[in-house]
């Protein structure tokens, strides 16, 4: 199997959609020799902040000298970035070789039980992660849930070293439940008997669900408290803060909410001491600073500044709005903001528009390359309730070109919403930006 064949296989699986339950995942892993059973995990569920928390934890463990596998989703540029070992994408050969094995096992399931037994795309991707990390002999794997918890394909694992629950809010309500406490009950399904549990102080209804599940499973619970964050100073390069006994911490991930993700990561690695994994303060400090997470308020170009952010739901948009207000709070700075928006139709896009659209001098909407995408014209109509300066683009290419034509060298272009188009914005920025800046940007 080569990369092109791998992509074709995964595209075919994607067209089949999602199927609930862990039965297929159990059979698939069994046919592969249950590679997950030989691995140690930190399992991360939640609505917002999962990827950033995974990035912080992985980077800290890398600095401490452990061989760390990290499985996250979705990809921004290309699929191999979802499978990282020691901070690097898995090799193309390891990716294709292991996917071929997973496909063979999945094909056998179809032969034995019919098409309805074929694993879903996410199940195949998760089994592939187990195979890759087992083959590499990873000391520990930082494993991000998909959308759920109890019924998530990743939950096939045995009790992890730590179960992490990031902030929980309304998202994927069609699959997880219509209320926050219903979604929380799904997320806490990753808590297993005796597992160390880490979360962050959040709404009483969510904390109540987490505490109840932790108590039921006799799982020690640590709640990271944002009230312990002191002397925070956010910048467009680094953010500094103190937390508890840790002074002068620095992170490169931009956004006020990233401090909260960082303290969750600190609490998670501290919990590893209970399973005799030691992490010193130097590793925590260096790991936090070196952590990278593409597509999260990430500056990808300058003159004009181009930022991409995966704010894809109401809670994430609220946080992005606060960050925009912090960095571009006065009228002169706000007049430089140009937004490129693309969202999925099953998200609360009216709320995303309400939080974000008023900040921009101009908003450009597009339709992401996703079967669940909201049409750009429909998004534009919603944006107009909060901002009259709206244009509709037919593609990321056209959206970025329009943004550069509207910009001068001091402008800030922020592309946000579905991650499914941010990779295209990143790829296009270098080539299109270089050409258009020569012709259009005021020197």
Image: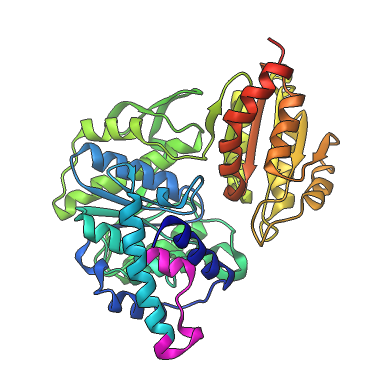
- Answer above or below: position of 170 versus 288: below
Residue at the far bottom: name it: 113
Front in this rendered view, residue 276 or 339: 339
Quadrant of the snapshot with the C terminus: top right
Q: Residue furthest left?
A: 276
Task: Classify 96 as above or below 70.
Answer: below
**Residue at (22% x, 59% y) in the render:** 135
> Which residue occupies 28% across, 30% down?
286
Q: Main secondary structure of the magenta part?
A: helix
Q: Is residue 353 left or right of residue 268?
A: right
Q: Residue at x 39, y 43 (%)?
A: 225
Screen quadrant of the N terminus: bottom left
Instruction: Confirm whether residue 162 shows in the render.
Output: no
Viewer-proximal residue among 343 and 177 = 343
Residue 435 placed where, x, y %?
Answer: 66, 23
The residue sitting at 26% across, 46% down in the picture is 269
- The extreme top residue here reads 443
- Residue 406 lies, in percent from the top left, at 77, 25
To which quarter of the image does residue 160 belong?
bottom left
Magenta region: 111-126
Residue 14 appearing in the image? yes
């Amino acid at each position: 199997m080569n990369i092109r064949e791998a992509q074709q296989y995964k595209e075919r699986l994607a067209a089949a959609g999602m199927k609930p339950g862990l039965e297929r995942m159990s059979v698939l892993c069994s046919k592969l020799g249950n590679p997950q059973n030989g691995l140690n995990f930190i399992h991360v569920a939640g609505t917002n902040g999962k990827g950033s928390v995974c990035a912080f934890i992985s980077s800290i463990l890398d600095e401490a000298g452990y061989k760390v596998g990290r499985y996250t989703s979705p990809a921004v540029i290309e699929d191999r970035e979802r499978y990282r070992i020691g901070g690097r994408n898995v090799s193309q050969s390891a990716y294709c070789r292991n996917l071929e094995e997973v496909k063979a096992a999945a094909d056998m399931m179809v032969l034995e039980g019919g098409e309805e037994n074929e694993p879903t795309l996410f199940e195949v991707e998760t089994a592939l992660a187990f195979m890759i990390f087992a083959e590499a002999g990873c000391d520990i794997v930082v494993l991000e849930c998909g959308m759920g918890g109890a019924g998530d394909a990743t939950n096939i694992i045995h009790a992890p070293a730590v179960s992490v629950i990031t902030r929980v809010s309304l998202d994927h309500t069609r699959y997880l439940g219509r209320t926050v406490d219903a979604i929380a009950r799904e997320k806490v399904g990753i808590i297993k008997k005796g597992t160390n549990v880490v979360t962050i102080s959040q709404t009483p209804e969510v904390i109540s669900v987490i505490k109840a599940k932790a108590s039921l499973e006799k799982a020690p619970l640590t709640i990271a408290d944002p009230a312990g964050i002191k002397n925070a100073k956010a910048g467009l390069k680094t953010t500094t803060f103190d937390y508890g006994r840790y002074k002068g911490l620095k992170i490169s991930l931009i956004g006020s909410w990233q401090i909260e993700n960082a303290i969750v990561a600190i609490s998670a690695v501290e919990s590893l001491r209970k399973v005799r994994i030691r992490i010193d303060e130097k590793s925590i400090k260096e790991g936090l600073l070196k952590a990278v997470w593409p597509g999260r308020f990430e500056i990808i170009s300058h003159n004009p500044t181009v930022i991409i952010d995966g704010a894809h739901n109401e809670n994430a948009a609220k946080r992005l709005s606060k960050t925009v207000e912090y960095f571009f709070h006065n009228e002169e700075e706000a007049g430089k903001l140009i937004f490129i928006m693309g969202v999925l139709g099953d998200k609360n896009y009216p709320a995303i528009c309400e939080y974000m659209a008023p900040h921009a001098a101009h908003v450009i909407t597009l339709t992401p390359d996703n079967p669940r995408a909201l049409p750009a014209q429909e998004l534009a109509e919603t944006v107009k309730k909060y901002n009259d300066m709206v244009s509709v683009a037919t593609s990321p290419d056209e959206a970025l070109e329009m943004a550069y034509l509207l910009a001068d060298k001091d402008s800030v272009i922020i592309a946000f919403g579905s991650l499914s188009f941010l990779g295209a914005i990143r790829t296009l920025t270098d080539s299109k930006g270089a050409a258009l800046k020569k012709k259009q940007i005021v020197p």
